[in-house]
Image (cartoon, grey):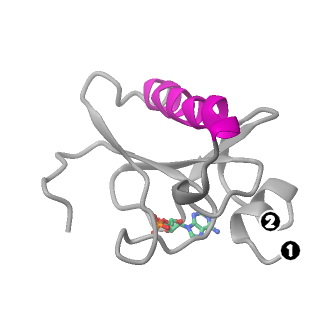
Amino acid sequence: MSCIFCKIVAGEIPAEIIYQDDDVMCFKDVAPQAPTHLLVIPKKHIGSIAELKDSDTNLAGKILVTATAMAKDQGISESGYRVAMNCGDEGGQTVGHIHMHVLGGRQMGWPPG
Ligand code: AMP
């Protein structure tokens, strides 16, 4: 298994895990870009959002709903936050396993760099 996020799911490398259930896991980003920076991933390996299938519809929704729950849990829901999913090279994706960033605790700019 070469996927770093699959290794986190398998417990082979450490992460600051905030939440997990049968389908998804949430942990702190190792290089935070904001005071709160979480990643929500599916436990199942999917390389990018470009690979999502119709059968992944519930899972994709669960990633978003989990992200909003995690934002509430971390106390950034009222002040506001950003969720982002980078896709492919020009989308800025560096890890080939779907992940939703949850960023908050500071003012976000737009457009992103
Ligand atoms: P992206 O550039 O959208 O693919 O985001 C990948 C994110 O994964 C980056 O923000 C990295 O800091 C983060 N990351 C990479 N390796 C780890 C790790 N072992 N634990 C937690 N976050 C990681």
Callout 2: helix, strand or loop?
Answer: helix
Viewed as shown, does residue 95 lie left or right of 4?
left
Q: Amino acid at mark 2?
A: Lys
Percent across and percent down for residue 32 are 42, 61
Quarter assignment of residue 80: top left
* Numbered tag placed on residue 1 in the rendering: 1
Closer to the chain start, of discs 1 and 2, is 1
Q: Secondary structure at mark 1?
A: loop
Occupied quadrant, residue 10? bottom right
Look at the picture and state if 74 lies above or below 13.
above
Looking at the image, residue 20 sits to the left or right of residue 84; the answer is right
Q: Is residue 55 magenta?
A: yes
Q: Residue at x 64, y 64 (%)?
A: 47
Residues packed near mark 1 inside 10 Å, few (<14), some (14 to 19) or many (20 plus): few
On whether residue 28 falls in the magenta region, the answer is no
- Which percent across, then down, holds residue 101? 45, 50
Q: Is there CB contact under 8 Å for labels 1 and 2?
A: yes
Which quadrant of the view contains residue 96?
bottom right
Q: Which residues are magenta?
A: 54-72
- The quadrant in which the N terminus is found is bottom right
Q: Is residue 29 above or below residue 102?
A: below
Q: Position of residue 61 (x, y in %)?
A: 55, 30
Marks 1/2: CA–CA distance = 7 Å
Residue drawn at x 53%, y 54% is 49
* Magenta portion: prevailing SS class: helix
Mark number displayed over residue 7: 2
